[in-house]
Image: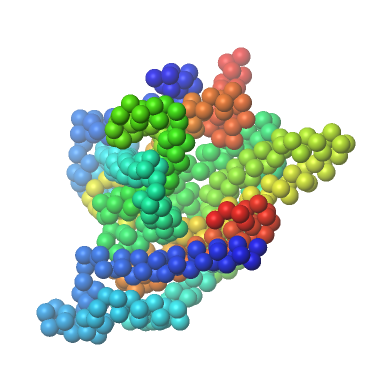
Amino acid sequence: MLSYLIKRVGVALPLLVVISFLTFGLNQLSPMDPAEVVLHAQEVPAITEELIAQTHAELGMDRPFLARYGDWLLSSLQLDFGESYITGKPVWSLLGPALVNTVKLTLISSFIIILLSIGLGVLCALREGKPVDLAVRGLSFLLTSMPSYWLAALMVWYFAVKLDLFPTSGMSSADSYVLPVSVLVIGYAGIYFRNVRSSMLSHLHADYALYGRACGLSERQVTMRVLRNSLQVSVSVFGLAIPIILGSTVVVENIFAWPGLGTLTVNSILGRDFPIIQAYVLVLAVAFVLFNTVSDLINAALNPRLRKEL
Amino acid sequence: MRLLQRLLQDKPAVLSLSIVAVTMLIGLAAPLIAPHPPNLVHMELRFAGASWSYWLGNDHLGRCVLSRLIYGIRPSVLWVLVALLASAGLGACVGFLSGYYRGRLDAWLMRLCDVMLSFPGYVMTLAIVGILGAGMTNILAAFVLMKWAWFARVTRTAVMQVADADYVKFAKVTGASGLRIMTRYIAPVAAPDLAVIASSTYGSMILQISGLSFLGLGIQAPHAEWGMMMNEARSVMFTRPELMLVPGLAVIVLVSAVNFLSDSLQKALDPKLMHAMRSDKPGAVLGRWLRGRGRKEAA
């Protein structure tokens, strides 16, 4: 297990370096000069060549690419992502609180998504082909074909405006969570419950389940054993689901004016605020790699056969 | 052709295929079919309801909603298809080279794929659009960039399965060139796998692109696009909900059809799955469920 751990982390670390390099390098492709963005934001009336050169020097852009990358990487490791081009505030002072809000939304949603997926997946697998199974799968098929922003808009219209049950936007009280969380849950539970269901089904029809029944185990006992084995597969699926949800709350956050990463990022994209976009990509890519590594490690701990791979 | 026959036996699949095909045809022939120019502003007709000359009413600038819906097929459906084909094509080329020639080339290409796949796709799409600027071209470029690695992986696995088969070895012995072997002997076997992945990616791409346009990051005004139409309808959602409903339903119908088709394709390609009927794909179940219900109602 230890050698697997070392190998797995050995894969993840260079990957993190490559990711940071690509994230930084991406900025060089921009058709727009950052100096112009900064000068526009400061409402400088006439942008001259000299001003641009001066701003370049202020931003440290006259230095070689690799030197800038090195500096950026070192300061990023200390959560210093530079200053926003538009507001001039440190990026982390904007990104940090937004990240916390998005993580709150993501964790609550993920928790419900996992519970619901397991519940529905197991239920459907045990009632395979029965009306419950068909109804749940038919509904999930329809819901996963639905644009999440459209569903969100309809829910705002009905639950927040017509029935006036929940606030339409913002993050003021516990009630504010209900609608955004429901939209996320509806979107993702429909996808992930299928994983649980098919993994559960393949185990229910496996030889060892048949053997268990033949030995006189009650159906409940067989189910408990099958459940344990099939949930193992789901660990990696759910491990990856959390960063995916973290990265795709963008649309939902925008509709409900959630003060999170998604809202911040879309505004930064529209305003060409590169340091924030850069930090956002870096933070999420790192989260993605970390979750991926951890879920692989958990899986390897649960299932020794997997340790041989890699 | 056997594949087509099998697919045609599946009634829901035929329905889905016709929905997708008809939508694409309407999109291609948009100037002939649309009753009005999509960007023609009629301020006196702002928010007018449905009428004989404007079947779906008019939007906040008095533009014909039906015409905009028809023209919206072009970016939302056709251009996405172009991006899909581009990334599938690129991925297939890489996958073929990798899977057929193996060796060092394969190792390098697969490391590259690993790096590409380790990025969260949605975040990277946002990042590319963020750096290059909002707009349809940049989103499509981001899609191609983010998806090819996935296609390359799938193609490589499929190619590797047959690359060592006896008939391929025989072809090599008879002196067929690498290109000929790949196109004539391996491609037909690898194509189905690629088709299944491509069709299921298509649905999610349509959803994503309309989502990005909804956020204002996609196609720019005044061009019509489904996500964009919903974005414009958002401010009047409570007074004129139908402006929001219509493009949304269009997306749902199309994406369901594409997903359904993808499931049926998978079944048609895998006869085992068809007989076993123990597929975990919801399409099959919904199809049988609907058929069963139809029979009950008929009785």
Residue B194, position in %: x, y?
Answer: 41, 37
Residue A297, position in %: x, y?
Answer: 61, 61
Residue that lies at the very extreme toward the top in this rendered image: B299
Q: How is the image coloured?
A: rainbow
**Count the marks: how many?**
0
Q: Is residue A161 visible?
A: no
Is residue B143 or residue B43 the one in the foreground? B143
Q: Is residue A101 visible?
A: yes
Image point 20% across, 34% down: which residue?
Answer: B31
Residue A160, position in %: x, y?
Answer: 52, 56
Q: In the displayed structure, does residue A60 sit left or right of residue A238?
A: left
Is residue A288 or residue A271 the one in the foreground? A288
Residue A109, position in %: x, y?
Answer: 58, 58
Quarter of the image containing the N terminus of chain B?
A: top left
Image point 47% across, 60% down: which residue?
Answer: A247
Q: Quadrant of residue B224?
A: top left
Image point 48% across, 68% down: which residue?
Answer: A13
Q: Where B162 sits versus B42, above or below?
A: above
Quarter of the image containing the C terminus of chain B?
A: top right
Image point 21% across, 81% down: which residue?
Answer: A62
Is residue B13 or residue B179 the one in the foreground? B179
Is residue B76 or residue A214 the one in the foreground? A214
Residue that lies at the very extreme toward the front in this rendered image: B173
Residue that lies at the very extreme toward the right in this rendered image: A216
Q: Where B129 sits versus B86, above or below?
A: below
